[in-house]
Amino acid sequence: MIEKIGEPSSLLSKLLNLTFEEIPSARSLVLVVNEGNEVIFKKSHNINPREDNDISSLIIRKALEEKHPILIHDLRADPLFKDNESVVAQNLGSVLCLPLIIENRARGAIYLDRKAGFESYSRQNLELLIAISKPINLILRNSFELYKQGEGDFSDPKDFLIGRSKSLRRIQTLIERVKDNDTPVFICGESGTGKELIAQAIHQRGARRKGQFVAVNCGAIPDNLLESELFGYAKGAFTGALRDKTGLIEEADKGTFFLDEICDLSLQLQAKLLRLLQEKEIRRVGENRTRSVDVRFISATNKNIEKEIERENFREDLYYRLRIIAIEIPPLRERKEDLPLLLDHFVEKYCQEMKRERVYFSPCSLELLMNYSWPGNVRELQNEIQRCLIFSGDDNFIREEYLSSKINPQKETSSSTSYNFFEAKAEFERRFLHQALSRYDYNKSKTAGEIGLTRQGLFKLLKKHKIGLSKR
């Protein structure tokens, strides 16, 4: 039985009636689900709600999974839906579906369709639907029990370790295995991949979470000051030392100390760090006595540390002390399957910070973002989303003209004639497959393995897009 919550449900019904008046449709369906995916509000017109194989259910499911609006001009020409029984039986032509996104979670959808032969839905219809959905989202956010308290908090590092790639799942598993012991952890990865966030996740999820997490970038502090910052100093140790000062390592006692860009540490400080790891003691600058410290060390670098050892810029004995547990973070270009989730996450995060309604990507802008190599990794992605939201103003879409020139070098602009998510996705798949086949010399097995598909899965996509193999 579907729960209706008095007055909010009545107001919601009036807004939906307005939607159907402004965007005439043959059939319509609106549903809202809670945290347990239980339907708590549902309203339909000319649709049998018991038919799970109805095109409405398939489209809504797709919109909720993708978190993108769907506009199909002609269902009968769409390869995914043209043979659907309800499309044929109902003589359907055009479809419009908008997911209702709250706290970056798909909590429902508005579905509309029209008969074949009638005017298809336009981008203007979609923009109007998005505008009407804003007060609907407000009602849902304030009146329905959709999500648990605190779920909208993005401050926890786990919220940034987002994705479904094998490499990210492996990192999550490693974090769980090492979080409760004191073994040093060494994190390597390119700049912007989130090394400090992983260190924070280890600390916050582990047994030392009640202690301090102290982070230092070894390359950001001049070498002549770094020793006193790390180890502290005694009064009178040098000019300007007017009082005793506790070092950052001491501040991390009973907690975690994170040394970022460890390769920038001087050989002299490397020797002192090695002694600290061996003896669990420090000596402040200008003092003779030692002090015991209980600190878990995590270090990181974006350099090739083995080459630094060969060049004698880094001590090999210290390296083996720090690298008992190693976590390697792949660059974003090697885990493209995580990109849609990251895009959704940061759009929601920065829309909340800017106090604006949820926006969506145009199909072309989404393809350009997916096709970009992201040399600056997740940090560059964050900056790009913030920039796009600023330039988009009150627009409901992040269009291709709002993207940076390095992502949109051809300066493509949005078309006013089409907004078909499936067509855009299919075109992206075609381009991606052509590029992948060319990159791996048309070797089917290697191509499938490198892009994360089975051989059968690759053949299925090639057949779907009618792509022939000129070589192996």
Image (tube, rainbow, N blue to C red):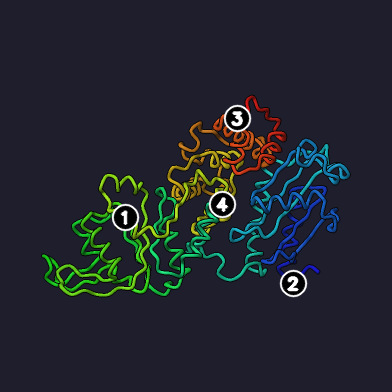
Residue 62, image x, y percentages: 70, 50
Whether residue 209 is visible, yes or no, is yes
Cα–Cα gap, marks 3 and 4: 24 Å
Q: Which mark is residue 403?
A: none
Helix, strand or loop for disc 4: helix
The residue lying at 69 percent from left, 36 percent from top is 459
Q: Are marks 2 and 4 in contact (CB under 8 Å)?
A: no
Residue position for label 1: 262
Which residue carries the number 4 mark? 166
Q: Label for residue 442?
A: 3
Closer to the chain start, of discs 2 and 1, is 2
Marks 1 and 3, how far apart at CA:
42 Å
How far is disc 3 from disc 2 in space, using C-alphas? 61 Å
Instruction: Name the amino acid type tagged 2.
Output: Gly
Q: Which is nearer the eye, 104 or 374?
A: 374
Compared to 441, does 174 lie above or below?
below
| Amino acid type, mark 1 | Ile
Q: Earlier in the sequence, mark 1 or mark 3?
A: 1
* Residue type of the residue flagged with mark 3: Tyr
State the image coordinates of residue 199 (x, y, percent, origin top left): 42, 61
